[in-house]
Image (cartoon, rainbow, N blue to C red):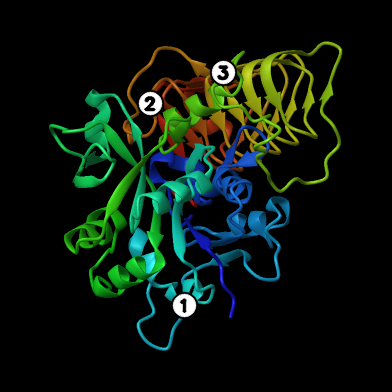
Amino acid sequence: MIKKEMIAMLLAGGQGSRLGVLTAKVAKPAVSFGGKYRIIDFPLSNCINSGVDTVGVLTQYQPLRLNTHIGIGIPWDLDRNIGGVTVLPPYEKSTDTEWYTGTANAIYQNIDYMESFNPDYVLILSGDHIYKMDYEVMLDFHKKHGAEVTIAAMPVPLEEAKRFGIVITDDNRKIIDFEEKPEKPRSNLASMGIYIFNWKTLKEALLAKASQPHLDFGKHVIPYCHENGAPLYAYEYNGYWKDVGTLHSYWEANMELVDIVPVFNLYEEYWKIYTKSDTLPPQYLSNDSVTEKCIIGEGSSIYGKVYNSIIGCGVTIGEGTVVRDSIIMNETTIGKNCEINKAIIAENVVIGNEVKLGEGEELPNETDPHIYNNGLVTIGEKTVIPNGVSIGKNSVVSGITAENDYPEGKLLSGKTLIKAGDDR
């Protein structure tokens, strides 16, 4: 029988609705990041760098691009005969067919997959965080403390603690209590949604709570283990970790990559970030182009000026165009003499000539102020923007738009323009 010490289960089914049009047609973990990467590359690379060679990736929402990206796991050296990477969508069973309804329900529905490796430990990961972490060090901590459940936690400023699940520990890091988004936090150790379970403990908890609707780790499984006397410990992590769940945090995390001394370094030899790379020609920068503090993906052609921006692969930026503080994803084409300020432009977008993005004053977005804010302009994938229009801040455009969609050639700040056939 196959025997693996630790296998990983990577939850990658989330829609990421706070990323607005960026996730209208693609699962959040498949959204591109840092030019040539996708968000899921980070936890997958952490796995292989930590010696974890068996990873189940649980997909659900819009999984096509994620499945194509992961394939059989070659870029992460996870194409193994035994173990490797396996994509686990919800599937039809003879009775009781259902979608994954909560983080732990998704794991529960794959008990047979985990059982087949007869693991000692199961590592539960989320597919939408940007960080580098050696899970082997966390496993050593788990074994040393005789834990049955170890929760990775990081210190956060006390005033921000109420946004997180908070763990309260004794001097030995044993968890004595936890609170979900407490009004008055008693500790500043926030759960990162990364767990190591003894397999027996996890299996018992999942089976005991299986009938719970929307079965969740933080609300059901971990409290069950705690109530039943399983020793729970908090593993403190002090490195870089970013939940890119909102457009602003996603934009910020990308911008941090082009700092003079980046907080998060994509170039470390000993902890490589792997990704599926298409075979593309090198970047082309014309004589008149200017680039400062940028990441520019392979196969891109730059004829204009680019400052403090992240440019994906296969992007074209026309002559006379100036791009500042923006993220432009793969295969997007921007025409000539455009001004692009603080924009997030998704994949396969076509922007005409003399277009201005990020014009005017900042007004709250009319439909989704909680999504489109902080002065950003967001353009959904495969959008077409005609020549000569100007688009304000905190606005969103998605779909194939024409001149008559822009009264007097403008889309004012805070406006939403989503053409029919486009999901919000």
Label 2 secondary element: loop
Q: Nearer the viewer, residue 342 or 192?
A: 192
- Report the amino acid beneath label 3: Asp
Q: Amino acid at mark 2?
A: Asn
- Residue 250 coordinates in the image, percent (x, y): 48, 32
Using the image, tell me which numbered label, if any, was put on residue 325. Answer: 3
Q: What residue sits 33% from the left and 35% below the top? A: 368
Q: In the figure, is residue 241 to the left or right of 169?
A: right
Q: Residue 100, can we see it?
A: no
Marks 3, 2: nearer the viewer: 3
Return the disc, 3 or 2, that comes first in the chain's sequence: 3
Apparent side of residue 217 relative to residue 270 in the rendered image (left or right): left
- What amino acid is labelled 1 in the image? Asp
Mark 1: secondary structure: helix
Alpha carbons under labels 3 and 2: distance apart: 15 Å
Q: For the N terminus, which image quadrant?
A: bottom right
The residue that mark 2 highlights is 373
Q: Is residue 83 left or right of residue 362?
A: right
The quarter holding residue 161 reads: top left
- Asked whether the beta carbons under mark 1 and mark 2 sit within 8 Å of each other, the answer is no
Please tell me which of labels 1 and 2 falls first in the chain.
1
Is label 3 in contact with label 1 (beta carbons under 8 Å)? no
N-terminal of the pair, mark 3 or mark 1, is: 1
Kindly identify the residue that appears in the image at 24 percent across and 46 percent down. 175
Q: Where is residue 316? Give x, y as percent.
A: 75, 29
Q: Is residue 378 visible?
A: yes
- The CA distance from mark 1 to mark 2 is 44 Å
Tell me the residue that label 1 is attached to: 112
14 versus 391 height, above or below: below
Circles 3 and 2 in contact, beta carbons < 8 Å: no
Q: Number of numbered discs present?
A: 3
**At which x and y percent is residue 365?**
35, 28
